Image (cartoon, rainbow, N blue to C red):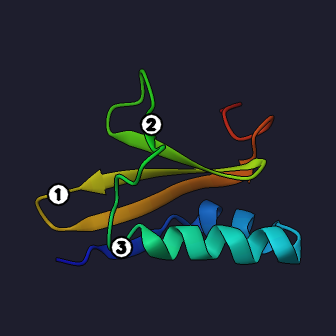
Amino acid sequence: MSYRLDFTSSAAREVKKLPRPARDRVLIAIEDLTEDPRPHGAKRLVGTGAAWRIRVGNYRVIYEIVDDVLTVTVVRVGHRREVYDR
């Protein structure tokens, strides 16, 4: 059972702005979410409803899971000190 992957427009822009080595690692981690949207180390974010986060080095991927339609939507991607600021 594979999940479909979506990006918000802002998340897509944030991925493009990452340095090349970090972008490659982040995209691999995001791709892996289609097979296992709750991998070991993923944490549910408090106070955000259905948002989860994974760590990829110093970068964080914030995403939402909709199990009814098998969709993972990437909401934010960024450095750990900036990604939670909104």
Q: Earlier in the sequence, mark 2 or mark 3?
A: 3
Q: Secondary structure at mark 3?
A: loop
Q: Quadrant of the N terminus?
A: bottom left
Q: Are marks 2 and 3 in contact (CB under 8 Å)?
A: no
Please tell me the numbered disc located at residue 43: 2
Query: Looking at the image, which is closer to me, 3 or 13?
Result: 3
Q: Earlier in the sequence, mark 1 or mark 3?
A: 3
Query: Looking at the image, which is closer to me, 35 or 76?
Result: 35
Q: Residue 73 appears at what percent x and percent y?
A: 41, 62
Horizontal side of residue 77 vs 82, given as left or right: left
At x 66%, y 55%, the residue is 77
At x 73%, y 78%, the residue is 24
Q: CA distance from mark 1 to mark 3?
A: 12 Å
**In the displayed structure, would residue 23 be above or below residue 57?**
below
Q: CA distance from mark 2 to mark 3?
A: 16 Å
Q: Secondary structure at mark 2?
A: strand
Residue bearing the label numbered 3? 34
Res. 9 image quadrant:
bottom right
Q: Residue 30 appears at what percent x and percent y?
A: 52, 69
Q: Secondary structure at mark 1?
A: loop
Please rate how many residues cluster around mark 1, counting C-alpha atoms within 10 Å: few if below 14, some from 14 to 19, many from 20. Answer: few
